[in-house]
Amino acid sequence: MPCREVVVGDGVENAVSEQVWSAEVYSRNARFVSDLGVGVVEWLDPKPGERILDLGCGDGALTQKIGETGAEVVGADASASFVEATRARGLDARQVDGQALNFSKEFDAIFSNAALHWMTDGEAVIKGVERALKPGGRFVAEFGGHGNVAAIRTALRALADKHGIDDTLADPWFFPTADEYRGMLEAGGFTVDRIEMFHRPTHLPRGLTSWIETFRAPFFDAAGSRADHLMSELEALLSPQLRDRAGQWTADYVRIRFAARLA
Ligand code: BEZ
């Protein structure tokens, strides 16, 4: 549900080492992401008639849920495939870089689920959100916090080191602590009503390989003909921690959830 790493402007996702999204693959492998985002929609508490931006809307599943409350919702994502999938639900969606939002005092609230960790320039995101909100507007979101998917990231970094792959491909995300992010919000002009960080072990219904294919394909693209071998190595490294005796994979997710508002 991302708004980063993608060149926008000409409508083309330009990527060798970049994350490229397919709404179809995402919906097959990652439906749990929007299912688990229902709690943060409750924090948003959308009201009929409110104009709300869903930042990093992905395939629009939660955008639609927000719209069903009677709010006037707009999806935003850097991925053309996600924007198309959101529009296919009959919703308004814009292809934008979340780190360069150019809305002005337009929204009553900005919502985001599982997307802010893809936007490594967190200050730029907060600046754009501040500009886009009306006075008193709310910013309510959930994303990965410090330590998120640490086992997976550590194993990918070890493999990058061993096989001479660029380690920024192993670990491209922004996972701050709650204290750090609170400070960033306050520096950006927000009052933070609630912020919490919590562990949420997350079952991967289609296994580790599908998770990697969905969220970290560029690392394996860089491995070229060694990709299958590296995937086996990755599974062997992570199996003791993330795979149970029945063969089920569970990732070590850590979330930050917050509700903030402008004066
Ligand atoms: C997350 O939702 O926490 C996440 C998703 C993909 C990659 C990394 C983290």
Image: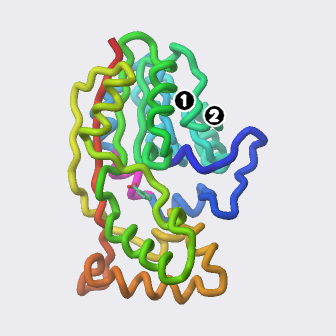
In the rendered view, would you say 38 is above or below 261?
Answer: below
**Magenta segment main secondary structure:** helix
Residue 242 located left or right of residue 228: left
Observer able to see residue 28 = no
Identify the image's colour scheme: rainbow, by chain, secondary structure or one colour: rainbow
- Residue 103 percent across, percent down from the top left: 58, 21
Q: Nearer the viewer, residue 217 or 202?
A: 217
Q: Regarding ligand 1, which quadrant of the image does it lie in? A: bottom left
Residues 165 and 111: in front is: 165
Residue to which mark 1 is pinned: 74
Mark 2 and mark 1 in contact (Cβ < 8 Å)?
Answer: yes
Residue 94 quadrant: top right
Circle 2 packing at 10 Å, graded few (<14), some (14-19), many (20+), is: many
* Amino acid residing under circle 1: Val
Q: What's the magenta region?
A: 31-37
Q: Is mark 2 within 8 Å of ligand 1?
A: no
Q: CA distance from mark 1 to mark 2?
A: 7 Å
**Tag 1: Cα neighbours inside 10 Å, few (<14), some, or many (≥20)?**
many
Give coordinates of residue 215: x percent, y percent.
50, 63
Residue, disc 2 = 94
Q: Is residue 42 above or below residue 261?
A: below
